[in-house]
């Protein structure tokens, strides 16, 4: 995340193993909540919205914390993927090598699932905050709340795919079930909420 946007995109489009889809999801989620913060900052100090001033200040604090968490997850996703990438490269010529490779792979899958699942959780939090921005933020920038909700939802759906591609290879069926159950709850709840936010934004614009 210390790279420029152009450097990040160039790396993302290259054959380098990282960054990948998970890091991109975290970044898109951060963009989504950043748009909410923009609307919040545009709302502060406006006499018309004085009655929600304290609510907006609290929202902005939560949004800043969440944005930083998502930014950190960009790098964490890359760090979690490397052991998995290395596991795939281990030799599998003998029975012992195959067993060792499988053991390392299964351990690496846990970390590789954990980061995108956390990204999905953060995207859910972002959608919650964006819902409040949609209700209390200035109408002149309400479209940006909708854009933010679309971004957060897209990142959520992408994080889902990054979890599933790893749980699909898991041998531990109980752990797989726990991870996929939480993931499904997040996706069902927040996809619906994101669509509701976007619909309310469009209704507000139409007027």
Image: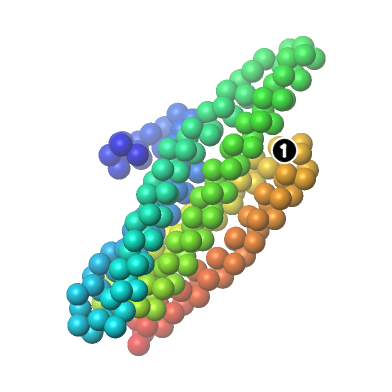
How far across and how far down the image is residue 67, in percent? Answer: 38, 53
How far across and how far down the image is residue 68, in percent? Answer: 37, 49
How far across and how far down the image is residue 177, in percent? Answer: 74, 49
The answer, for residue 143, to whether it is visible in the render is no
The residue sitting at 35% across, 87% down in the picture is: 207
How far across and how far down the image is residue 31, in percent? Answer: 36, 55
Q: How crowded is mark 1: few (under 14 residues within 10 Å), some or many (20 or more)?
A: some
Does residue 133 sit above or below 78 in this rendering?
Answer: below
The residue sitting at 60% across, 60% down in the picture is: 186
The residue sitting at 78% across, 43% down in the picture is: 173
Left or right: residue 142 versus residue 21 is left
In this view, the residue in front, 37 or 31, is: 37
Q: Please tell me whether mark 1 sits on a helix, a strand or a loop.
A: loop
Does residue 19 sit above or below 120 in this rendering?
Answer: above
Residue indicated by mark 1 = 170
Q: How many marks?
A: 1
Could you say which quadrant of the image residue 129 lies in?
Answer: bottom left
- Most extreme residue toward the top, as rendered? 94
In this view, the residue in front, 65 or 124, is: 65
Left or right: residue 127 versus residue 192 is left
């Amino acid at each position: 995340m210390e790279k420029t946007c152009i450097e990040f995109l160039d790396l993302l489009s290259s054959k380098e193993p990282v960054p990948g889809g998970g890091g991109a999801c975290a970044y898109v989620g951060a963009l989504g909540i950043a748009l909410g913060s923009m609307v919040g900052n545009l709302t502060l100090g406006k006499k018309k919205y004085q009655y929600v001033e304290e609510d907006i200040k609290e929202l902005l604090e939560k949004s800043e914390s969440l944005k930083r968490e998502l930014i950190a997850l960009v790098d964490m996703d890359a760090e979690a993927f490397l052991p998995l990438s290395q596991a795939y490269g281990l030799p599998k010529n003998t029975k012992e090598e195959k067993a060792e490779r499988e053991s390392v792979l299964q351990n690496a899958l846990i970390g590789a699932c954990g980061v995108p699942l956390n990204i999905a959780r953060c995207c859910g939090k972002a959608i919650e905050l964006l819902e409040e921005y949609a209700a209390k933020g200035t109408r002149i920038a309400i479209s940006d709340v909708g854009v933010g909700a679309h971004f957060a939802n897209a990142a959520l759906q992408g994080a889902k795919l990054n979890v599933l591609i790893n749980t699909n290879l898991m041998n531990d069926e109980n752990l797989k079930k726990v991870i996929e159950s939480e993931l499904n709850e997040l996706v069902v709840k927040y996809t619906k909420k994101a669509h509701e936010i976007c619909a309310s934004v469009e209704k507000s614009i139409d007027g």
